[in-house]
Image: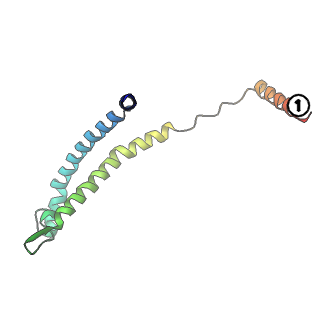
Amino acid sequence: MSNFLSGFKKFIAQGSAIDLAVGVIIGAAFTAIVRALLDGIITPLIAALFGKPSLDGVLNFEINNAHFSIGVVLTAVLLFLLTALAIYLFIVLPINKMKARQAVAPEEVPIPEDIALLTEIRDLLQAKNSQA
């Protein structure tokens, strides 16, 4: 039980739980934005193309009194893809670019002449001692 508690404390202290909570909140906010985009722009375009107010009414059929709606699935897939695209464009890409800038290798500091000379002497002495 103490291993569980110490592991849980470590998990909380690392910020993983906070990162997860922030991700859920941002995902919910993006879902609302994408839903508004879907309802305000894409759905009217679909209505203009298919003559239906949304994809929910597209490709509906019935077999033995069982109602099937492929449009509902298409709406969910479109919402998912738009949400994923928005998260990628506005969160993942900027964070990756920021990390890439931070990961640039620092410039090499030139070794002073005296240190280089001492290093060379040390290497020569080690080589001479290993031969003897």
Q: In which quarter of the image is residue 113?
A: top right
For this orientation, the residue located farthest to the left is: 65
**Residue found at x 69% / y 30%:** 110
Residue 28 in percent (x, y) is at 23, 43
Q: In this view, does 110 lie to the left or right of 84?
A: right
Q: In this view, does 30 lie above or below 5?
A: below
For this orientation, the residue located farthest to the top is: 114
Residue closer to the observer: 31 or 19 = 19
Split into 4 quadrants, where in the image is the C terminus? top right
Mark 1 secondary-structure assignment: helix
Q: In this view, does 59 lie above or below 7?
A: below
For this orientation, the residue located farthest to the right is: 132
Residue closer to the observer: 127 or 29 = 127
Q: How many labels does the image show?
A: 1
**Residue found at x 30% / y 40%:** 23
Residue 97 in percent (x, y) is at 44, 43
Residue 98 in percent (x, y) is at 44, 39
Q: Name the residue under label 1.
A: 129
* Crowd rating for badge 1 (residues with CA inside 10 Å; few <14, some 14–19, many 20+): few
**Residue found at x 86% / y 29%:** 125
Split into 4 quadrants, where in the image is the N terminus? top left
Q: In this view, does 120 lie to the left or right of 98?
A: right
- How are the residues colored? rainbow
Residue 65 in percent (x, y) is at 7, 72
- Amino acid type of disc 1? Asn
For this orientation, the residue located farthest to the front is: 1
